Image (tube, rainbow, N blue to C red):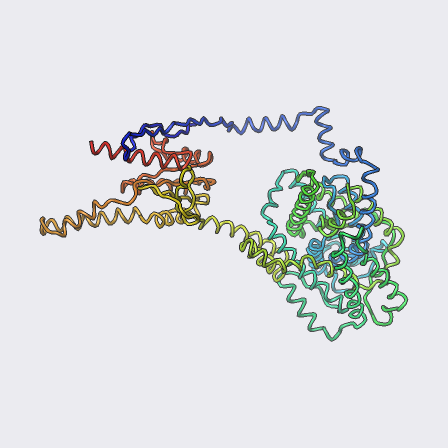
Amino acid sequence: MAEFSNVCSVTEMPGDNDAKRSFHHRMFLEPQEKKRSMKSLVVKQAKKTCSCTPAKVKECVFSFFPVLQWLPKYKLRDYLLGDIMSGVIVGVLLVPQSIAYSLLAGQEPIYGLYTSFFASIIYFIFGTSRHISVGIFGVICLMVGQVVDREIQRAGYDIEPAVPSVLTDTAVYVNATLSPVNQTSQKLLCDKSCYAITVGATMTFIAGVYQVAMGFFQVGFVSVYLSDSLLSGFVTGASFTILTSQAKYLLGLDIPRSSGIGSLIVTWTNIFRNIHKTNICDLITSFLCFLVLIPTKELNEHFKSRLKAPIPVELVVIVAATLASHFGKLRETYGSSVAGHIPTGFLPPRPPDWNLIPNVALDAIPIAIIGFAITVSLSEMFAKKHGYSVKANQEMYAIGFCNIIPSFFHCFTTSAALAKTLVKESTGCRTQMSGMVTSLVILLVLLVIAPLFYSLQKCVLAVITIVNLRGALRKFKDLPKMWHLSRVDTVIWLVTMAASALISTEIGLLVGVCFSMLCVIFRTQRPEAPLLGWVAESETYESLSAYKNLQTKPGVVVFRFEAPLYYINKECFKSTLYKQTGVNPVWVKAAKKKAAKRMLREKEVDSGGNQTSISMDFVSEPLEFHTIVIDCCAVQFLDTAGIRTLKEVCKDYREIDVQVLLAQCNPSVRSSLIRGEFFKEGEDHLLFHSVHQAVDFALGAQGHSGTSTSE
């Protein structure tokens, strides 16, 4: 590759009694040799991957199972008490939330407990974060529930009420002509609740496969397209959908769950149409639960620095509501909807339904992306806070296996959850041993306590779900501050939130990603492009529009373009350059040609007229500058359109006797210019490593040219 250098010259500087000589030293930068042979790269990577030594095997095993690294070093005296305390507290909080969020995912309560139990154990083995709590997350549950409802309707299960045969581990035989799913004459089928968890588990399996594949192919970069403002807007918008889906339980209404585009509006329409059917008992219960939960939650947050552990108000409410419902016979007397029988123990493992994969494969993509994006971001946030490191790819493996393995045990999709992670951290968690303690608490519920929740009203579960949305809904209070910090991020937040709430969660996520990428494109399409001035007694040049008391060099214009130069903004580059310099070379050339033609016509009429001399004066009128220095420090890259644009600009200005110099180009831009044959032979010295050097060269060259002319 060619060497890049600055010009070396000795120039007479006019305007001084003693001639001062300005030396522009040539700087030789020899580029590193880059091996571009794809074959050699593949062979090298293959040797590295396929080599097998005891040390490498040990490293791979320890890397894939991080628990083998930290568990032997576990400090019982320092860590055990904090891990037990945080594990028990998170487990106590997780039990009611697991039951409540099962309703959101369209599942029976037992499956939420299964999901939380298995997720904590598997993350204990594969995870690298010491603090995050992996389990049920409201937005993921909502997305799972929407797909489950759609598939249940497709299968025709919404025609008849569900019989909870899955809870007694039985099945029913139905004729295949009644079900669009099966085409055989007679086949063993699940009922509605069994089919719901089959759909959920199948989609969980596919989402986990996607996440493991992303970890294997190291495509975690996908998460960079999910900015903080986009994720926050998405979660807030989805929170409105969650609130809407739970509103019918607050009122005790029996209306179908809407899904698809505009489900929020459809659901509220159905609620107001059936508002006269409100169950007064459920409404009063909901009001009383709100009256207890919201103030206590606020007290927990207000005094979290003083409390050693948050008050487990959700568990207290569930126990009290269950006792009230049981002894008050609310179901028999007032027709309140209750959780029903929750069995003890575990159901036999069952593989996902492979026939359902084509139906849910596309729906699993946004679920997988949201799940790993939230998990990785929370892992990195708490690792940074506590001074340790996490491996993003291993986190993708961990959350992927937290979905793949439990999908065989009647579970649905999981991810890290911020609220439970904050509780876990604040109550003394030191390692993921607290996750094992949480699993033991849930196991105790699964083996002994679960049937006692038979009489628990569903409206209580809905209240718990809605109260836990407070954090997402409070983001509206942060909008003024966000607007002050970044208007673009605020607009992205609003667009994503509105699309997620009013259209659908999946489309809202897609709209948010597309809109945020468009914002990036628009920012580079019309970037800042100021003229620069010299800071006295330095070699620094800054924006004339941003700072006062800057000086300009006579005959030299310094222009900075603060964006990559590519096909989208090439016209903006040219128009801004022409506007800032006040000279459009195309127009100048056209005016000269027009004046020359007019002069020739006037010569034919009257060779000695005054008008001819005016035209001659116009043609020879000098410009205010002789050099344009383009500061390329903010130009990250050039494409073919950008190189062509620079060529055109240099050519057009050269034709009106103005030279264009480039300064502060990074290696990528320099390489692009060389490959694009930007410089003619012997002109590569016109590429400068600083604006100051380029300006000095321009002034020296012009002074030398003027001296030669006078001689």
Of 191 and 211, the residue lying toward us: 211
Whether residue 662 can be seen here: yes
Q: Is residue 480 above or below residue 577?
A: below
Residue 573, image x and y in percent? 40, 47
Residue 430, image x and y in percent? 77, 41
**Side of 323 relative to 37 (left or right):** right
Identified at 69% across, 25% down, the residue is 52
Q: Is residue 173 above or below residue 655?
A: below
Whether residue 111 can be seen here: no
Tally of numbered tags: 0
Q: Quadrant of the C terminus?
A: top left
Identified at 54% across, 27% down, the residue is 39
The residue furthest bottom is 276
The residue furthest top is 53
Q: Is residue 584 above or below residue 677?
A: below
**Side of 347 relative to 564 (left or right):** right
Residue 332, image x and y in percent? 87, 70
Identified at 83% across, 50% down, the residue is 442
Residue 685, image x and y in percent? 36, 31
Q: Quadrant of the N terminus?
A: top left
Q: Is residue 460 above or below residue 695?
A: below
**Side of 167 relative to 560 (left or right):** right
Of 709 and 561, the residue lying toward us: 709
Of 670 and 84, the residue lying toward us: 84
State which quadrant residue 267 falls in.
bottom right
